[in-house]
Image (tube, rainbow, N blue to C red):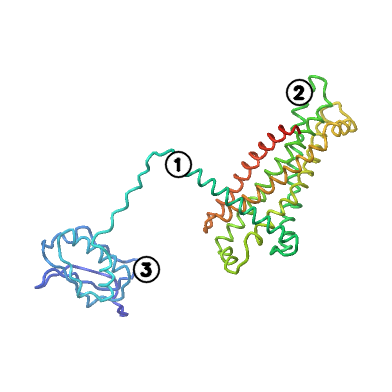
Amino acid sequence: MNATDHGQPEWHLDSDASGTVVVLSGEWIAQDGRIPPFPADGLRQVEKGQGIAFRTESLGRWDTALISFLWDLKQQATRAGLELRTDTLPDSARKLLDLLPEQPAPPPAPPHRAFAPVTAVGAYTIDSLTEIGTVTELGAETARGALAAATGRGRMRWTDLMSNVRDAGPSALLIVGIVNFLIGAILAFVGAVQLRKFAADIYVASLVGIAVVREMSAVMTAIIMAGRTGGAYAARIATMQGNEEIDALTVFGIPVSSYLILPSILSLILTMPFLYLYGCLIGMLGGFCVAIGMLTVTGAGYFHQTINAIALSQFEFGFVKSIFFAALIGLTSCRIGLRAGRSAADVGVAATRAVVVGIVGVIALDAIFAVIANTLGI
């Protein structure tokens, strides 16, 4: 490129013995924003069959702005049947112009999507089974990592586990307590409205106790953790994926399942059963407050009725359910984070998807446990 300052970019048509000449002058720099366009009828006065040459004695610095201008000229010359002689252009400009086609490529036709429901169902089934197999394999690797960590041969850092336990356990006590207290109060209020008609006020304690211990505490605590902790796990791993931290761990030979996923899942499995028991107590307290305020029930009577109504097997059933809920939330959230893209928008998508999948999965798994409990007579 010529480094001489030649001022504003300009062009005009001239003629000589060889035919039409395009005279270029000035500095053709895109950043300056002064590049003149080549009009659609710029070659209307040139007779068909003539050649078009260039004169560049006054041409200063140039960049891709000049190439864009020359390409517009090249396309119009091709449509008008004119020969474009580029031998007088700078060598680098001529080589770049020769790389461009005479006409831009037409846009690709939109793909034809035939109506094939069987194919769509088959593809969805295969993808679903593949994903289930991947999550199962991830769970197996995590279980092996947990056994290795228990025997002192694992790659998991105990500081990571304690940090995740603190985030998933004590930090969640407030929101778990508020939600379960309100759930117990709502159950007591609804039960009181109906049982009062039959002078069976005391059975509000049984209603609240059985509902909270058997279903509501485990399910509501799991839903809270899916929205609070599961989404955080997915967003954290998706951010590491975008920052190429996952790739760095793989390059250094550090297993992601032991370093990242195992502390996350294990912290949920350790804290969810205790959060479930805590939710049961707070839910019963909510029902107690409503019953004392609305009904003619004494505190001792409410406590005695609750103890008689709830069997130990109900706590055991809810305790087991909470462990499975924790494993489901941890596995799906970490898997969704690992599948996320590398942009900032993908982090939000991964967090949203983890919350949705976690909540739906918890409810579906609770339905399976309800069938199992009915079969076993629990």
Residue 285, can we see it? Answer: no
Q: Kindly identify which numbered label has been placed on residue 208.
A: none
Dot 1 falls on a residue whose secondary structure is: helix
Q: Earlier in the sequence, mark 1 or mark 2?
A: 1
Rendered-image quadrant of the N terminus: bottom left
Q: Foreground mark, 1 or 2?
A: 1
| Cα distance between the residues tagged 1 and 2 | 49 Å
**Quarter of the figure with residue 347:** bottom right
Question: Height in image: 323 above or below 302?
Answer: below
Q: Where residue 42 sits in the image (x, y, percent)? A: 19, 61
Dot 2 falls on a residue whose secondary structure is: helix
What residue is rendered at 65% in x and 48% in y? 329
Q: Kindly identify which numbered label has been placed on residue 194.
A: 2
Residue type for callout 3: Gln
Is 214 in front, or is 126?
Answer: 126
Residue identified by numbered label 1: 120
Mark 3–mark 1 contact, CB under 8 Å?
Answer: no
Residue 331, can we see it? Answer: yes
Question: Height in image: 216 above or below 51?
Answer: above
Q: Earlier in the sequence, mark 3 or mark 1?
A: 3
Q: Foreground mark, 3 or 1?
A: 1
Residue identified by numbered label 3: 31
Label 3 crowd bin: few (<14), some (14–19), many (20+), radius 10 Å: few
Q: Where residue 334 sits in the image (x, y, percent)? A: 62, 54
